Image (spheres, coloured by chain):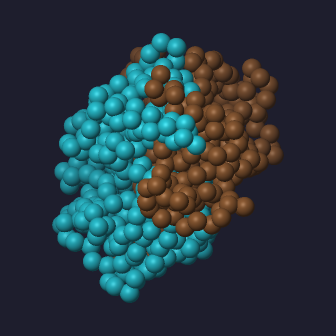
Amino acid sequence: MSRRKTERLLSLVVCLLSTRRYLTAEQIRQAVAGYPEQPEAFKRMFERDKEELRELGIPLETGSLSPTDGEDIGYRVERQAYELPELRLEPDEAAVLGLAARVWRSAELAGAAAGALLKLRAAGIDTDEPGADTDVRQGIEPRVATTEPAFGPLWQAVRDRRPVTFAYRAAGRSEPQTRELEPWGVVNRHGRWYVAGRDRGRDAVRVFRLSRIEGDVRFSGPPGSVTVPPDADVREVVRTWDSAPTQEHTAVLRLRPGAGYGLRRYATPAPGVPGVPGVPGDADSSPIDPWDTLTVPYSDTGRFADDVASFGADVVVADPPDLRDAVIRRLKGVLA
Amino acid sequence: MRPRDKAPATAGAATRRARGQAATSAERLQRLLALVPYVVSRKAVGLADTAAAFGLSERELVDDLNLLWCVELRDPDPYCPIDLSYEGGEIVVSQAESIGRPLRLAVDEASALLVALRMLADVPGLEDRSALSRLIAKLETAAGAAAAPSAQVAVQVDKPTGDAAIARIREALTRKRRVHLSYYVPGRDEATERDVDPMRLLVVDGRAYLEGWCRRAEGVRLFRLDRILGIDVLDVPASVPEEAQPVDVDQGLFRPSADDVHVTLEVSAAGRWVAEYYPCESAEELPDGWLRIRLRTPDTRWVRRLALRLGEDGRIIAPEELRAHIRDDATAALSAYANG
């Protein structure tokens, strides 16, 4: 960085804020120290400076100098558009603010959160008064991570309403496919990020998991070219997409006593089976069955077979036969 | 100010600072535009406090103040719009011209705070909801149009089964009491019983954890709230030992240790979820959508269960001992079917 450039940009901001009328580029060149005399060099530098101010969110206005003469363009920054409005926080609100700013600590929006906090402190707000340490903050530490590289460009696309393209590997697919999406929003659910929007190729609402996006996310249209339907609720779209279908099957499982807790949590004792308490013992020599027989509801045979297989010899499917076969298939697959 | 609340102006600035590089002109300009109102709104502030608030050394801060003081506009007549002094270690801005108020919040800035606050409002068991909703309303008003895009980002918080657990944890934290947990460990398929001295409630990526000193393991442990089968607040004061180190949540919740076993496994396209679900050291593409995953773990029991779950969609490559265990597990399970 150069100190001279910082000085020039700062003078430019003060100059544009101090004027009520629009200033021409030439007037600005004369008022602000550090611009070159040579017209082309000045023009290039001034263009870059304007761009930098806009990127910082400084509302640089352009307008014609007189209503009769539309040729001459001038610049100014209106105080009201520039200044953060008056904002007063109660101590408990300030405490919560400090907590919120920590949420993104190591994530994509961490810089933005820190920038916001800096401006609010500059407005006279103290986020860490000793007396403000109320219950809400005590012992709670919230964090959100954005480890997926796609988060940054997708958030920009959502913010600026731009369509994007990316390579996506859907669950179970061996090859990624190119998708073009009008993104409506990004949602974190169960600790995973999703983007929802209109898939242009399929002309339908689709949800994509960010961790399955491969390579770069590219903008495929200018800012403002995406219209989000006013009734679109991205949280709801992702929730519906992610929710498991209703439970419609029932399995009868035999569980070794003391094992299969992951399944027992959803289980009920099987009807018609004598309630035998689970006594540890040798199954072969015992006259009574020491195993617990339970019924467990499930929806998808394949997924439930995965779950059951993971318990190995501790859980055996008695019924239905297709579930039993699916588990046996997995176990044989291990030995294949 | 406590050290953890010191924040550099931007993440970019933090990275560069870590690499020993200076801030860009734009970043410094941002800081200068905040520095003037920071002092103005407080009438007078000390150099040391201000430097700490901006994450600067006193020398860097003085350099910033000198730069502000030197600003000169030349037309029509030369004048200095900013007047300030920092004699005796106290900063006073006597003239701030047009930059006496901070710049409005940018869309990213407003969104970062609002999305985080709405997530906090979603955390079950927080009693101070009124402060949250008042603050959200005030920030929305202050940010104006810049607040709108934040509605398109959301972090949903998992609701653990019943708010009862979270309420009891909050009670134990506030009253500094020990709890008794009945806790399910899926990797070992065990329900465990233990006494825990609660330290913090962590909400990481929408999932809630109790961090505490586990008296059974004699170490700091994290307990996922949705795996707590039962919790009782004991009438015993919590006593967290001095040596208990809170988990650094910014470094990730689960970190490898030197005693870990190195596991290599390969999964088919249908098993690629493994790389998303478990913390892996590396994932390498193989033909036909297969993936070779390397990971480290202190306890391989869960890998054995994972291998059974994957069936033909996975194969354990190393260590050899683990392969043998898994073959035994599968054989034992199949014989249970053969006998039944």
Q: How many marks?
A: 0
State the image coordinates of residue B46 (x, y, percent, origin top left): 26, 66
State the image coordinates of residue B83 (x, y, percent, origin top left): 34, 56
Image quadrant where residue A329 sits: top right
**Which residue lies at the image location 37% right of the left edge and 64% below the top edge?**
B211
State the image coordinates of residue A336 (x, y, percent, origin top left): 47, 22
Q: Nearer the viewer, residue B92 or B50?
A: B50
Point out the image quarter for the N terminus of chain A: top left
Is residue A67 in view from this perspective?
Answer: no
In the depicted structure, whether residue B49 falls above or below residue B299: below
Q: Nearer the viewer, residue B265 or B103?
A: B265
Is residue A272 in view from this perspective?
Answer: yes
Image quadrant where residue B262 sits: top left
Give the colour in which the image draws chain B. Answer: cyan
**Which residue lies at the image location 33% right of the left edge and 31% below the top edge?**
B324
Q: Nearer the viewer, residue A289 or A236?
A: A289
**Which residue lies at the image location 62% right of the left edge and 18% below the top edge?**
A177
The residue positioned farthest toward the top in the image shown:
B287
Chain for colour brown? A
State the image coordinates of residue B2 (x, y, percent, origin top left): 29, 65
Q: Nearer the viewer, residue A245 or B84?
A: A245
> Is residue B152 rendered to the left or right of residue B274?
right
> Is residue B248 rendered to the left or right of residue A304?
left
> Is residue A331 rendered to the left or right of residue B144?
left
